[in-house]
Image (cartoon, rainbow, N blue to C red):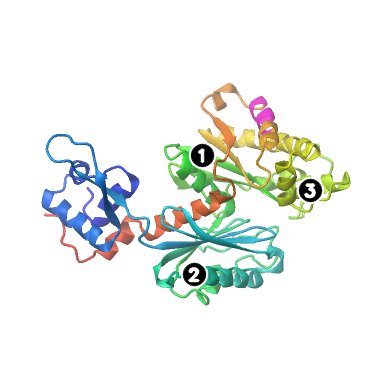
Amino acid sequence: MPTGPGDVFDLVRSGRATTRGEILDATGLSRMTVAQRVDALLGEGLIVEGPTAAATGGRRPRRLEFNVEHSRVLTVTVDTQHSRIALTDLGGHILAEDEVQVAVASGPSTTLAATAEAAERLLKETDTDPSSVCGLGMSLPCPVDPATGRPSQPPMMPGWDGYPIAEHLQGSLPGVPVLTSNDADAAAVGEHAADFPTARALCLVKVDTGIGTGIVIDGRVYRGADGGSGDIGHARLREQPGEVCQCGAMDCLAALAGGRAVARKLTELGIPARSGHDVGELLAHGDPTAARLTQEAGRLIGEVMATVVCVLNPEVVVVGGALASAPLLAGIRESLYRLTLPRATRHLTLQLGSLGSEAAIVGLARLVVDDRFSVDAVNARFAAVAPTR
């Protein structure tokens, strides 16, 4: 039975109980204990009283809400060629942002120094006290070991394997806890929170310079044994022309259908492109060749996603990343539905993500808040509160 203020806070934040009466019904706690818990949370500023709720007889109850203005979150989304730094409230709403042009191939020290400087600059420009920042979330285009928070054998990021990211950033942002995540995982959390909070299983396939999949099951990211879940970009396809992937293997999905592969094909046809971002720009401007090649890439991605769908049986597959577009979605749809039984897809929603490039930012903010304001973390703040009578 929930007993601490953290448990009550979790009920309010999740929307499962938003009045004192609903908290009474949900917990079975005494009226006095509920009053103590709610007053403590209000006093700490973790929750606020909103408008009155619908009356059920007697005085209208005051609605309780999670106070998204309680503190701030810094997010850093690291891409292959640039990094985006954003300051958000606890609900993931972007308050200010900046971007630095630094390639991950330049190494972790250079990349992290540039992002830390941008984060410090953003705090100064917005007159944000660093002590009000509850955490920093950083997404990376590689597997991240959940036990250490460090990159785990990233195929496209020389020098990053096992690098102590949190420890490095502490030098510039002392006292700010750092949480790291794979980029597709963060984007999947963002899309799940924004549009599919009740979905039991959601997959997000991110098609950028590389390809990866984020998986959310029962509201939690599934990272696998050591952070390598969803790394479909290095699944090898048979009967392909023999492309060498950046990981050194032949015919990986990313080498054949990622943004870099589409960019290379466009360049060969006289349309200069270097990365997935460039391909995305061409798609946004309606370039027919980019659309054709992207749809072809989508068919290959759909072949691999068909297996993912058969294994996980998700309710939702969201398509994101720089190449996310109608042609990519059409190509994935062609192969995925052709290669799976109707049983596997009868309840499947396949669509483009609604958050676009902000998906990972929203997801990182959510991951930081889930960590910093968990039941245990909030209960620890109120360790002196009297136990339930």
The range drawn in magenta is 332-338
Q: Which mark is residue 263?
A: 3
Q: Quadrant of residue 334?
A: top right
Mark 3: give few (<14), some (14-19) or many (20+) Cα within 10 Å. many
Could you tell me which secondary element the residue under label 3 belongs to?
Answer: helix
Whole-angstrom CA distance, mark 3 to mark 2, is: 36 Å
Residue sitting farthest toward the top: 342
CB-based contact (under 8 Å), mark 1 and mark 2:
no
Across and down, in percent, residue 108 comes to: 64, 69
Question: Residue 52: image x %, image y %?
Answer: 23, 43
Pick whichever of labels 1 and 2 is earlier in the sequence.
2
The reply to whether residue 228 is in sight is no
Q: What amino acid type is highlighted by mark number 1?
A: Leu
Callout 2: helix, strand or loop? Answer: helix
Task: Tell me if 96 is positioned left or right of 36 in this view.
Answer: right
Using residue 185 as the reference point, say whether residue 251 is left or right of it. right
Could you tell me which secondary element the residue under label 1 belongs to?
strand
Q: Is residue 317 above or below residue 261?
A: above
Quadrant of residue 333 in the image? Answer: top right
Q: Is residue 131 above or below residue 84?
A: below
Residue tagged 2: 123
Find out whether residue 328 is within the magenta segment.
Answer: no
Which image quadrant is residue 193 in? top left
Quadrant into which the C terminus falls: bottom left
Q: Residue at x 55, y 52 (%)?
A: 360
The percent coordinates of residue 47 (x first, y second) are 29, 55
| Residues tagged 3 and 2 counted as in contact (Cβ below 8 A) | no
Q: Nearer the viewer, residue 247 or 271?
A: 271
The local crowd at label 1, few if under 14, some if 14 to 19, many if 20 or more residues have their Cα within 10 Å, is many
Residue receiving disc 1: 202
